[in-house]
Image (cartoon, rainbow, N blue to C red):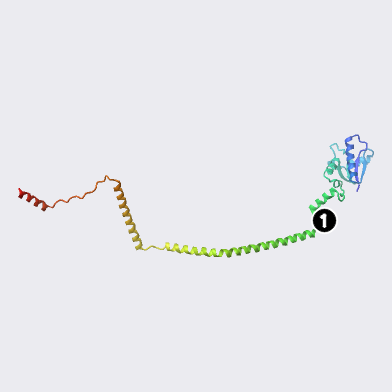
Amino acid sequence: MVIKVFLASSSGSTAIKKKQQDVLGFLEALKVDYAPLDIACNEDNRMWMRENVPVEKKPTNGIPLPPQIFNEESYCGDYETFFDAKEDNAVFAFLGLPPPPGSKEAKEAEKAFILENGPVENGTVEIETVESETVENGTDDAEDEENLEAEEVDEENLDDDSLAPMKQEEAQEEVEDEEAKGEDDQPVSEGEEDLGSEEEEELRQLEAIVSLAFEMLKTPDIPILRKKKRPQSRKKRTSSNSQERFRM
């Protein structure tokens, strides 16, 4: 594959001359074989370049300016696209050429290929190693899961053994509580009810007497009740009257 560079040897534009020199100098530094094609002295070269530059790459006036770069019949780009590829270390990809081994672009291309397709040894991808690793990882994961399940079962059995006496104690306490509740809930006989009502009545009366005594002590103005003298009987009165008459 030959790289074709279309340029104008007798251009009056210093900018075009500088761009052409940059492209040719960089290709020589990379040791890329190229063929310079002058459009100023060869009308066929100029017409071929104008016809093969894609329409979307042409300027608004429809006339592409040199330098224009081709790989055989395939269009690569103009100076701007070439400069962008140089900045990105992708000139060989821009030209459609394989990068030389050991170059920076070759290393980056290899890294990109490995990221997409995996490691390569002698031009073949190591699919077997990848599959074996996945199988081994799968078996390891299965074994880990089995061991984890066994540990969980052992822990559950241990917990059941340690909690057995505690469960027995709790069951015994529940039985005792139920028995105590049963005793409290037993019905009371009629005799016991009457006895309880009499005791309550006596307590009420005693409380009433005590409260009345406290009120009497608190109020000293209450007159003390005196015992009235009974009237003498009629017989005694008549006897006393007869004695008085006798004395007179």
Q: Give how far across and how far down residue 117 sits, in percent.
A: 80, 54
Q: Is residue 133 above or below residue 99?
A: below
> Which residue is painted at 57% across and 64% down in the image?
162
**Position of 130 compared to 145: left or right?**
right
Q: Is residue 235 above or below residue 179?
A: above
Of all residues shown, which one is farthest toward the right?
Answer: 41
> Which residue is painted at 70% across and 63% down in the image?
143
Q: Which residue is label 1 attached to?
A: 120
> Which residue is painted at 45% across and 63% down in the image?
180
Q: Is residue 172 visible?
A: yes
Q: Is residue 51 visible?
A: no
Q: Give how far across and how far down residue 144 sits, in percent.
A: 69, 61
> Which residue is painted at 52% across and 64% down in the image?
169
Question: Residue 51 falls in which quadrant of the image?
Answer: top right
Q: Give how far across and how far down residue 204 sits, in percent.
A: 33, 54
Q: Is residue 24 above or below residue 158?
A: above
**Position of 229 compared to 138: left or right?**
left
Question: Residue 3 falls in which quadrant of the image?
Answer: top right
The crowding category of the residue bearing disc 1, from other C-alpha atoms within 10 Å (few below 14, some 14 to 19, many at least 20), is: few
